Amino acid sequence: MPYLNSITNILNQWQAAGVFAYILPFLMIFAVVYGILSKTEIVSGNKGVNATIALAVGGLSLLNDYVTNFFSIIFPYTGIGLSVLLVALILMGLISEEDWAKYVWFGLGIIIFLVVVITSLSDFSWWGGLGYSWQEAAPAIVAGVIVLGLMSLIIWGGGKSNGKEHH
């Protein structure tokens, strides 16, 4: 077998060993919890206590496979969303370098985020799926986009304020 040590075989062995299902999710949860505890200094910056709490949270997060299943659903969709955003970034770079482009990126990022979350939750067996198709969800998505658009107009629209009230 000349392809015994191919990347595909190695990744399949890692998958069978639980690297993707348990080790990587554990490390990610541990790192995030440890980072938050270290940054906030809730326990007076005690690294041992921070590590113990992060270890416990990371380990307990993997008990019932909820995190494992959710991560196996959301991260592939996230990769697809990032790929779409990258292609849009490349195409937008060909067209414009104007200031308004950052708002387009923000809006596109929000839309991709919503699609990733909605798709992931609809596939997530722990929730039992959301039980609707894209056709049924389209009005809610359109309404959400309109609300976010109006919010952005309220927050960033209008003139500059100098902080002084006129009486």
Image (tube, rainbow, N blue to C red):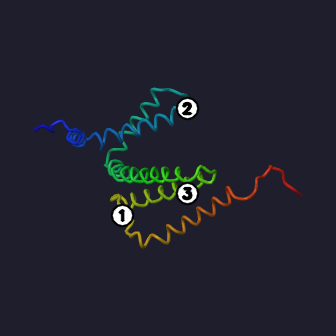
User: What residue is at 47 percent from the left and 26 percent from the top?
Assistant: 47
Residue 18 pos. (x, y %): 26, 41
* Dot 3: element: helix
* Dot 2: element: loop
Q: Which residue is mark 1?
A: 129
User: What residue is at 38 percent from the left and 49 percent from the top?
Assistant: 75
Which label sits in the foreground, 1 or 2? Answer: 1
Q: Amino acid at mark 2?
A: Glu
Residue farthest to the left?
Answer: 1
* Dot 1: element: loop
Residue 50 pos. (x, y %): 47, 31
Tell me the quarter of the image containing the C terminus.
bottom right
Local crowd at mark 3 within 10 Å, few (<14), some, or many (≥20)? Answer: some
Q: Which residue is mark 2?
A: 41
Q: Do the residues under discs 1 and 2 have CB atoms within 8 angstroms?
A: no
Q: Do the residues under discs 3 and 2 have CB atoms within 8 angstroms?
A: no
* Residue nearest the observer in this picture, 165 or 58: 165
* Residue nearest the observer in this picture, 9 or 75: 9
Residue 37 pos. (x, y %): 51, 35
Q: Amino acid at mark 1?
A: Gly
